Amino acid sequence: YTCNHGRELPLLLATFSRLLFLQSLPPTAQPGVRLSIPGPCGQRAVPTRIVGGKDSELGRWPWQGSLRMWGFHHCGASLLNRRWVLSAAHCFQDANPNEWTVQFGELTSSPSIWNLQAYYNRYQVARIFLSPRYLGSSSFDIALLRLASSVTYSKHIQPVCVPASSSEFQNQTDCWVTGWGDITEDEVLPSPHTLQEVQVGIINATMCNHLFSLPDFRRNIWGDMVCAGDPQGGKDACFGDSGGPLACKKKGLWYQIGVVSWGVGCGRPNRPGVYTNISMHYEWIRKIMAKNHIHRPDPRPLLLLPLLWAPLLLQLP
């Protein structure tokens, strides 16, 4: 959300080097209209707070990422493939990639410093691409991140599909928004900072423009925006959920329709959440990914040698 977005949660900075773990094989690809990137997408191993939401389960939203600045949760993000991550442009007041990492495969935004698996699944950002048409307002609020190393897929870490068109998702009522943001306008997500999920419906552009033309807060809903929520209120993203995914299921696959962008408060009646419409940026995403394709072999981190030497050192007199 544009106001007070990305409220940080306390977390000790991890100081351990990554450990090599066996890479899980990706599931068999399934048919579906999705972004032309290698590998399957939109699948999860776990069957089926955000305002009005509930605690999620590990692996239920395997593309969900925690975008972290200097190790602290700042915004949401989503995994497109092994090297590319999607988020919101307004999350990056500082676009120095050295300051940013993305955490995958965790239910909490504050994993323990002793959780080596969590540290292994935290990836350094190599480059940050903001939409060239983003001028600091709510339009064109989208960012594409290239990671410094390839993500290891597992049953808890999988990419989401991206549609070239969102027309078939209009008026769909069973979409979901996820994140680690505040659970009300005045209440932060309490410890242990568990990922929240809430079911929302897509609100068509005509209705959304009508709702935002009502008194108290008038705002234009542009073509690259999509609205979701409940006109009665009570179901919404909130501060700290910015950059996270709005996902809908179609023919057995999950597609990310929107990126959490802005709203008026959180969960207010007649004020649905407003998301960046990903399909309107499909060509920009495709071109950035193609232009910055990685041709060289992926460097993998080395096993921390002191951990290997430790048993021998303990045997010394």
Image: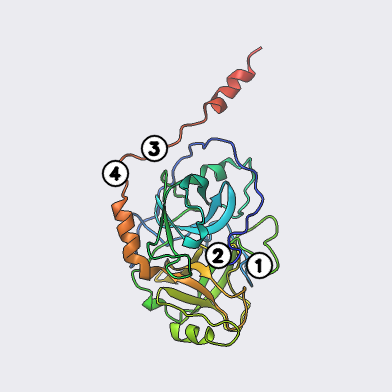
Report the residue marked by disc 1.
183
Q: Tell me which numbered mark, 1 or 3, is placed earlier along the sequence.
A: 1
Please tell me whether mark 2 sits on a helix, a strand or a loop.
strand
Q: Are marks 4 and 1 in contact (CB under 8 Å)?
A: no
Please tell me whether mark 4 sits on a helix, a strand or a loop.
loop
- Please tell me whether residue 190 is drawn above or below residue 313 in the rendered image: below
Give whichever of 285, 106 is nearer the camera: 285
Spot occupied by residue 248 in the image (x, y as percentages of width and height): 46, 71
- Indicate the amino acid at tag 1: Ile
Residue drawn 48% across the image and 68% down it: 137
Measure how far apart labels 2 and 4 are at the Cα level: 33 Å
Q: Are marks 2 and 1 in contact (CB under 8 Å)?
A: no
Report the residue marked by disc 3.
299
Q: Quadrant of residue 267?
A: bottom right
Q: Residue furthest toward the top?
A: 317
Residue 12 placement, left or right of 99: right
Residue 222 placement, left or right of 93: left
**Label number found at residue 295:** 4
Q: Quadrant of the N terminus?
A: bottom right
Tally of numbered discs: 4
Please tell me whether mark 1 sits on a helix, a strand or a loop.
loop
- Indicate the amino acid at tag 3: Pro
Measure how far apart labels 2 and 3 are at the Cα level: 31 Å
Give whichever of 264, 297 is nearer the camera: 264
- Indicate the amino acid at tag 2: Thr
Q: Tell me which numbered mark, 2 or 1, is placed earlier along the sequence.
A: 2
Report the residue marked by disc 2.
178
Crowd tier of the residue under label 4, counting other residues whose Cα lies within 10 Å: few below 14, some 14–19, many 20 or above: few
Q: Tell me which numbered mark, 2 or 4, is placed earlier along the sequence.
A: 2
The reply to whether residue 157 is visible in this rendering is yes
Closer to the camera: disc 2 or disc 4?
4
Q: Tell me which numbered mark, 4 or 1, is placed earlier along the sequence.
A: 1
